Amino acid sequence: MTRALFVIDVQNDFTEGGALGVTGGAHVAKAVTDHLRARRDRYDLVVASRDWHSPDGDNGGHFSPEPDFVDSWPTHCVQGSPGAEYHPDLDASLVDVHVLKGDGRPAYSLFDGFVADGRPFGEVLAAGGVDEVDVVGLATDHCVRASALDAVAAGLTVTVLTDLVAGVAAAPSAAALAELRAVGVTTVPSSGAGTDSPGGRA
Ligand SMILES: [Zn+2]
């Protein structure tokens, strides 16, 4: 068994004070770092994604001056801007693979992203032989949901660590977790995950 951690979009624009700040986002940044420092040996691979939009145009209708907050959003996570950076409480030195998504188009899922050498993330993941993943980050009702669904579709065994995610809104976040459970995703607090041996190779 090869286990990865997916850290979804823990960026300044998705945390308090950002363009699309999620309540609890900064807490998630710190808590994910604490989790990784305590449990780094649980993971063979740590992957972090960032929404990374073009400064030009509306990124395929993703940006709007009159956003509906469903399919269109205020300008956020523009490439090279402070809002696109990881939240400072996320220790990015603990991350093995950095994924960028949303260059010129909407991209909610980590699987829509690319790594630094230009390869699609799915290709990198398959090459690593990953078959199990824990998913954490922002936001539960959007990019965490989409990434977890794609992880299931990719054939992975998926767990969402419920104390290490935060959502835009409560009801859609609860609905997203229910939807994920319905397709076989385990949703548990981080304290309940991984009572198995270090490295997960038992
Ligand atoms: Zn976006």
Image: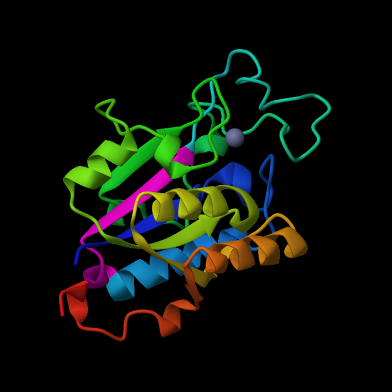
Image quarter of residue 22: bottom right
- From this view, report whether residue 66 is shown above or below residue 199: above
Please give left or right for residue 42 compared with residue 89 in the image.
left
Please give left or right for residue 25 compared with residue 194 in the image.
right
Image quarter of residue 169: bottom right
Q: Looking at the image, in which quadrant does ligand 1 appear?
A: top right
Q: Quadrant of the N terminus?
A: bottom left
Residue 43 counted in the magenta span: yes
Tell me, yes or no, if residue 64 can be seen here. Answer: yes
- Residue 88 x/y as whole percent: 47, 52
Residue 3 counted in the magenta span: no
Task: Give the extent of the magenta segment.
Answer: 40-50
- Residue 139 x/y as whole percent: 60, 53
- From this view, report whether residue 132 is shown above or below residue 80: below
Q: In which quarter of the image is the C terminus?
A: bottom left
At a point 68% along the width and 49% down the height, the residue shown is 21
Tell me, yes or no, if residue 88 can be seen here. Answer: no
Please give left or right for residue 43 compared with residue 22 in the image.
left
